[in-house]
Image (cartoon, rainbow, N blue to C red):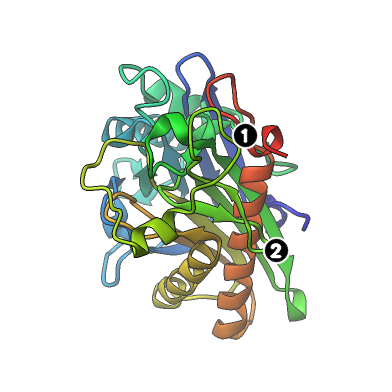
Amino acid sequence: MTGTITQVPGFAVGHASDFKNLTGCTVILCPPGTVGSVDIRGSAAGTRQLDALMGYHIVNEIQAIFLAGGSAFGLDAAGGVMEYLEEQGRGFDVTITRVPIVPTAVIFDLSLGNCRVRPDRAMGYAACQQARSDGVAEGSVGVGTGASVGKFHGIAQAVKGGVGTSCVAGPGGLLVGALVVVNAFGDVLDYASGRIIAGARTSPDSQEFVGAADLIRQGVVRHAFSEPNTTLGVIATNARLTREQAQKIAQMGHNGLAKSITPVHTLFDGDAVFVLAHPEVAADLHVVGLLGEEALRQAIDRAIKQAHGLGVLPAYQDLL
């Protein structure tokens, strides 16, 4: 399991992190000509400008995808990304200026740090300034700074989440990369063994996982939204895709979430998968979709295994 989403030519990733207040944001800057789409399966999504990813919209080129903490408050930080891109002369040409197209989604991280401090325009701008194509920081950085996993028994019995990335190669020069922030209500399963590696624990001092899916099957349920949730994935590829084909890849990408997180797509999650295609090589849709699923699973695994507790929650490395 090696590689990063930036191995797909033209893409760059930047993080901005607030380690004091435990929040942050991450931007994926796209090369010119990138098309994209999205598929949302969680019931608690917070988003902005996703209409530009839908069919029959006048816009067909995406300049960036932006992921932020702060719940719906964090959506404002996308303005900083737009400001940065406008300064670069990038965006949809409306004659008098160019309007950057920056589809955005947020995670709920308000209960881990300071709920009064959220990503803002300055942080969004700073993430763009930090964007690089030669490597991606992983773990508890950027949008993953305040991420956590396994909230069935509340935040005190959760485990630290974070950001992960990967890239897999296919035939004919095909590349499919992924970046994901794992902030799930459910438990995360190991990529190789399928055992729980991050999730709800039996007590705040325990290293033993309760197995949220098993409890729910027995009728033990949560009725209120009160803890930070949502897993957001981004697949980037050099395959030639239309917007409609990109949406199909996003749908298939959710299979990766379902194989690695349990339960997933709950009423308390805002799970979404974005797909970005910078068309360079011809590829079969099924090949791209399966590689996207694989890349997301690898990225989820890395997000957990690279996470740091930051002094507030145990991380995977603390539970070995």
Q: Residue at x 47, y 22 (%)?
A: 22
Q: In this picture, is 298 found above or below 279?
A: above
**Residue at position x 30%, y 31% in the image:** 76
Residue to which mark 2 is pinned: 193
> To which residue does mark 1 refer?
315
Q: What residue is rendered at 58% in x and 42% in y?
A: 208
Residue 124 place in picture, x, y as percent: 44, 29
Considering every residue shown, the one lying at the far right of the view is: 2
- Which residue is at the front of the view, 232 or 187? 187
How busy is the neighbourhood of tag 2: few (under 14 within 10 Å), some, or many (20 plus)?
Answer: few
- Percent across and percent down for residue 250 are 45, 68
Is 203 left, or right, of 5 in this rendering? Answer: left
Q: Earlier in the sequence, mark 1 or mark 2?
A: 2
Q: Residue 270's mark?
A: none
Disc 2 residue type (three-letter): Ser
Question: Which quadrant would residue 133 be assigned to in this image?
Answer: top right
Could you say which is closer to the camera, residue 238 or residue 88? 238
- State whether residue 253 is above or below residue 143: below
Secondary structure under the numbered disc 1 in the rendered image: loop
Query: Does the rendering let one see residue 243?
Result: yes
